[in-house]
Structures are given as structure tokens and as C-alpha cells.
Amino acid sequence: MNAIVKTGSMEQTTRIVSGNDSRSVDTAISNSWKKIAPFWPLKNLIAVNPAAGFEDLKFEDGLRQANVYFQQKELPVEMQQVNRESIKWLQAFFDQGQSTIRMPLRNRGLLKSVLSLIRFDKPVHKNHKQKIQWLENLPQSPDGIIAETLSQLGIQSPDQEQFLTLMLTTLPGWAAHVQYRTNWADAQDAVHPHPVTQAEYLALRLVLTSLIWPGAKELLRWHRQALQKADTTRTYSSISGSEITYQQGLVQQLKAAQAPQNSTRADAQLVFCIDVRSEPFRRALETQGNYETYGFAGFFGVPVSIENTVTGESYASCPVLLKPAYQVKETPDVSHQTCRHGHDRLQGIRKLYQSLKYTFTTPFSLVEAMGLASGLWMGVRSLSPQGAASLRSAVKRSIAKDYTVTPDITGIPIGQQVAFGSGALKMMGLTENFAPLVVLCGHGSTTENNAYATALDCGACGGRHGAPNARILATILNNREVRTELKKQQIEIPGDTLFLAAEHNTTTDEVEIYSGHTEGGFALQVQKLRNDLELARNENSCRRSAELGVKTSIKEAGKATALRAKDWAQVRPEWGLAGNAAFIVGPRWLTRDVNLEGRSFLHSYEWEKDNDGSSLTTILTAPMVVAQWINAQYFFSTLDNVAFGGGSKVTKNITGKIGIMQGNASDLMHGLPLQSVYRSDDEPYHQLMRLTVVVYAPKERIEKIVHQHAVLQKLFGNGWVHMICFDPREKKQFQLNLDLTWAHFG
């Protein structure tokens, strides 16, 4: 029921919301957010499918609708103005320490703080008394404001959900950040002092729309027309053709693989993350000696949060699909007090510099005082990146000493340690024939001046480095009490087997082994492994350099990648996961002699050791889903780098320390930068293809798992992911149809 009083050009509407109307609006709010995928902040960028809200549609239709909903090129001019005013307030509210003069009243929440201040925002209300009065008379609750503004704009009940969805998709980046903050945030962001709800965000968007574009009902017609004109037939046809060609070549190569008849004890076994960047490095290492490599999710099956007792930083080091089960504290190997004092000094200098740099007047004084020194420093960084890095490290060490950390796992009960250890070993199929050295190798990256740095780190560790988790599992598996319990589960680890942690730097291909105080024969074995890892590094770096357009010899390749990592002007320090196309689940012999070109996620799996299918179930419902998110992010960032990507690194700006904007007033960019997926402005490097999953297991087992999990039925049944089965019993290959039945491949 509405009572409308006309006051000048602004209608003052008093809306009495009935119970049914309220429920209808609540449903519309809830459903509208289903189209928005979350997007993580810069501190821990996680790959996600930006079109995840359309996965309940067949891929071709989902592709078409996502293109229309998220297009940014033909928005109505009035909606662009609404967006500009929205961005202004969202930037100020969500800032996490970049600005030195903060938006007041943020502790009240997004909606209340903005409504308390918006009366001073003349570009929004133009000093019209009616608009100011309307703002003052708005309902108190977000739901009430949403109902009020929908009525004000003339949006009828059948169109409300569609209109609310458009309020989100016409500014999708900021909506994605709110989706993260409200549903996916880590412990630190979940209790943020500046709260926001999904209803508050929608209410703010609707208030600004009502003030700026009273005729916003036109947005519905604009969307319907755009949907009618949209045609992705040619794009879909091109994608399908590329996929068929790729799959045929992949299957042909894998068919030639032969299982080994006899196996000797390896000198060392190394467990790498399933990341596609690990695959060519593993291949390079295996040619250097008697080594076996395995693929496993980079958090090593240990869902924990890590707390550094020196810095006080705490974060979840596990996939975002999981919640940390325990907290592990990392303690320094030297005086805690000394480390803490050094850290405080370093942070104090950084905070002082930032306050001088970003306050209104002090930047001028800062330039006067440090201009010459800054100019010289820029010259050194540009002309000698290696020298600049060494100098900076030396200065940093003079302020705060370097230290290494040790995980304290006493908070994890011994029974749970056994569960973590057995779960990881069983899932990767490493339950016998242990080598003298078993190295758990996490991964991370090192780059300079790169806002997207965490996008190159381990997604399975929440966008962080993987070494902490590797250290934890190595500590667990070296525990005699744990080994005794594992023996009862038919997992007997020899007394001469030592587990070590390591980390693979994907930018430079260096592998650092955390060997501690290994002695005697172990010390010699570790040194030999280090030598062979260096040879593998040079070989793989030479290949990677060629892909980056850099000519170098194998001998000099390591230096070339190290220099690239330290170059602050480098917009493409590495290709990341660009080119990813397949997720292969099976024994290493299936892929060992195949050049997969760094395009495949490799997850070790032995179907004969997985009698109940539980390991394969976990692989398909967790790591495979994450791989699909990665594949989809690269896919859509390549498809339209403005609508789904991050735009060019050259023209980007960091906003609020949470994300990227193009220029000074764009949407929050919610994808990968142009340089991560394109060779040049108009030549893509990443090939548009959906993920192809290859599983070496009986098709009946795969079929059973798919039918038991709705997420798999959606991904495979709607064509967002392909499934190919290498059936070891029938010795044939099968492809899963959209109706979830099998057909012979080929």
C-alpha cells in the first residue's frame, strides 16, 4: 500500500509494507545476490569464477547472460553517473589504511554512515530541499529503504528481483567485494570494525539511483534489449573447436603411457602442489636423477590458521572452501624480543612515510626533503634491479634482523595429527616404498611493485605461501608417535626416512629446502638434491623465459628469471597459471613421459588403494572445484578484460589497499590484469577453453561420485567442465555427456 504526496519534482512516498510484501522483497534481495561471485582483497587474491552465479544454466546460455549482465561498455549514461557517486562513497568506507584522513562514522555500518553524511554531498542532491527531506524521512532499516525506493522508482513486484540484480551487476566489482565481506571473509575481516550487509549495499545503491535517476525503471528495458541482441554463438563455436583439438591430442599422448613393471627405491620423493607451474618443473627434476614426484593440494591436507608471534599476523592457510581446524603459532629461532623490536622499528618507519606521503599538505615537504634521494633510488632500481634488491635487504637487516620460524603444533591433538598424516598420504597414494628423503614442497612467488602478487601464490593456502603448511606436515610425519599409529593403518614409514619441507618460488624456479640440522648421510643427500634442483631450475627457467620472449641459455636462465622477479618495472614477471586447460587425476606414470606444456593440474591418485572411493570424492569435490575456479577466472579475464578482468597494470590504481581501479573512479576490477593473459593489447596468450578433467579410475566409481554431489552434477551436466575417464579395467577412454551418461571418447 502506498500513500504518495507530491512535493515539487521529488515524490515523497510513505510505504506500508505488509508481511507478504516484506517476504517478497527479502526473497528478491537474496536471489539477486546469487548472481554475484565473491572477490578477495589484494592481501590474499583467490581465483574465482566471476560467472559462478550462472552455473545453473547450460554453459552457452550462461556465457551469453554473463556477458550481458556484466558488460561495462554500453551502460546508460544515467547509470554511469549513479556508479560514479556510488564509487566515491564505497572507496571511502571500505578503505583499509591507505588514506590518512578517514571517513567518519564508519563504525555505524555502510548505510547509516553514508546517510548521516550524504546531506553534505551536493553533487548527489543538488541542494534540492525535497531530496534532502526525502533522505531525512527514509525508513530506518535497509529492507524498509529497499521497499521504499523500489516503490519510488515504480518497480513492480514481478520486476523487483531483476532490478535488484541489475543494481549489483552494473557495478559488479564492488558488489563482489561485499559478497566476500559478508559470506567469505577470513576471521580478521569477518569482525571488521566497519560492518556491511548485503541489504545495506543494495539500499545505498537504490537511494543514490532514486536521487540521480528517477527514471531508472528504464534499466529493465535496456537489459532486455541487450539480452535480445546478445549472440555468443561464434565465441562458443570457437571455444568448442579448441577444446576438441586439445582433448584429442591430450588423450592420444596419455594412451601411450605404460605402467612400470618394477620399481626401485627412489633417492628422494618430492610432493608438489597441483599447480600447473609445478608440472614442467617436476618433469625437469625427474630427468636429473632417481626422483619420484607427486601432486597434492598445496595446503597438504592441513587446514590451519597461522599466527606469526613476531608480527602478530594471523591468517587462514587452507582452501577457502574449508575453515581452519586449529591455530598454529610460528615462533622465531632467535630471541623473540629482539625480533619484535626490529619489527616494530620497521613498521614505525613505514607508517611515518605513509602518513607523510598521503596527508594533504605533507607530500610537498616530503618531496623537498627526499626528492633527490628518491630520484637516485629510482635510478638504481631501474638500472640495477639486483643491486637495488641487495641494498634494500641490507638496510632492512640493519633495522630488523632476519629470522626463521618453527611451527608449534602442540595445539593439534596427536589423534588429529595422525588423521592429517594418513589422510594426506592415502590421498596421494604414497603409503609404501618411501624414499630416504620425502620433501613436501609448497610454493609462493616473489615480485616487485606488483599489486597482484598474491594471485601468484598458493590458492590452496588462501593466497599465501605454502611453506608453513609443508613445515607442519613434515613435523607431524617425523613424529615417532604418529608413525607408530600410522603403522596400525598399514602405513609403515621406514626409520631411515626423513620428511623435509621446502618451497618452490614459481617466479625464479628456486627451491629452498628447510633442512634444519641434518647430519651424516642425510646432509649429503640433501646437498645432492639441492644441486639437482638447481639444474632443474635452469632447465625450466630457460623454457619459461622463451615463453616470456626472453632469449637465454640454460646456464644463464636462472639469473634471467631472478632479475625479472626483482625488476620493479616488470609488468609480467611470470605467466602464472595462464594456459591452464586440464586437471589430471592419476598415477605419475600416466603423465611422466608426456610434455604437458605447463597446462595441467596434476593430482596423484592410485585407484587400487581407494577402495571406498573416498579419496577420489575429496579430489573431485575440493581441488577439482578450485581448479575450475582458476580456469574460469583466466577464461573470463581473457574473454573480456574490462568486464571480467583487471585492465592494464600500467593504468591501474590501488584503492583502499583492497583492490584495483582503472583511473580514479572505475568499478573495483575483479579479475586478472591484461598482462597476465595477453601477450600484447590484442594478442591473447591464454587460450579460451573450459577445464578438461581426466581421471584414471573405473567409470562406475566416477559416475557414483558425480551422482552423489550436486556441485559435480551442475558443473558436468551444464557443460562448465569436461570429464574424460581412463578406465583401467576396460582399458578404454570415455567422455561424460551432459546427461551424465558415458560415451566412448573420440
Image (cartoon, rainbow, N blue to C red):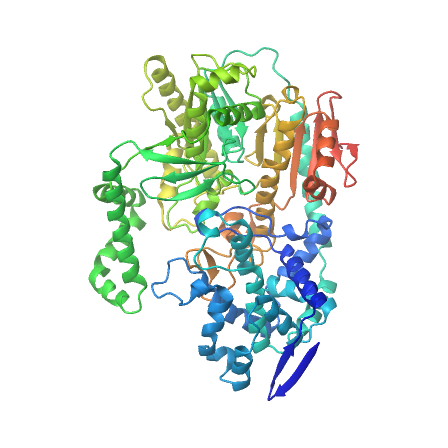
Residue 511 position within the rendered picture, expressed as x and y whole percent measured from the top left? 40, 30
Residue 76 position within the rendered picture, expressed as x and y whole percent measured from the top left? 62, 72
Rendered residue at 26%/39% (across/down)? 339
Taking the view exactly as shown, the residue that stands out farthest to the front is 19
Of residue 730 and residue 250, the one placed in the foreground of this image is: 730
Of residue 491 and residue 442, the one placed in the foreground of this image is: 491
Taking the view exactly as shown, the residue that stands out farthest to the bottom is 8
Of residue 513 and residue 473, the one placed in the foreground of this image is: 473
Q: Quadrant of the C terminus?
A: top right
Instruction: Judge left or right: residue 412 versus residue 578.
Output: left
Q: Is residue 94 visible?
A: yes
User: Where is residue 378, by image quadrant?
Assistant: bottom left
Instruction: Judge left or right: residue 234 versus residue 582.
Output: right
Residue 315 position within the rendered picture, expressed as x and y whole percent measured from the top left? 43, 43
731 vs 398: above or below = above
Instruction: Judge left or right: residue 332 versus residue 321.
Output: left
204 vs 214: above or below = above
User: Where is residue 732, by image quadrant?
Assistant: top right
146 vs 569: above or below = below
Q: Is residue 592 visible?
A: no
Q: Quadrant of the N terminus?
A: bottom right
Residue 45 position within the rendered picture, expressed as x and y whole percent measured from the top left? 48, 48
Rendered residue at 58%/65% (across/down)? 202
Of residue 252 and residue 390, the one placed in the foreground of this image is: 390
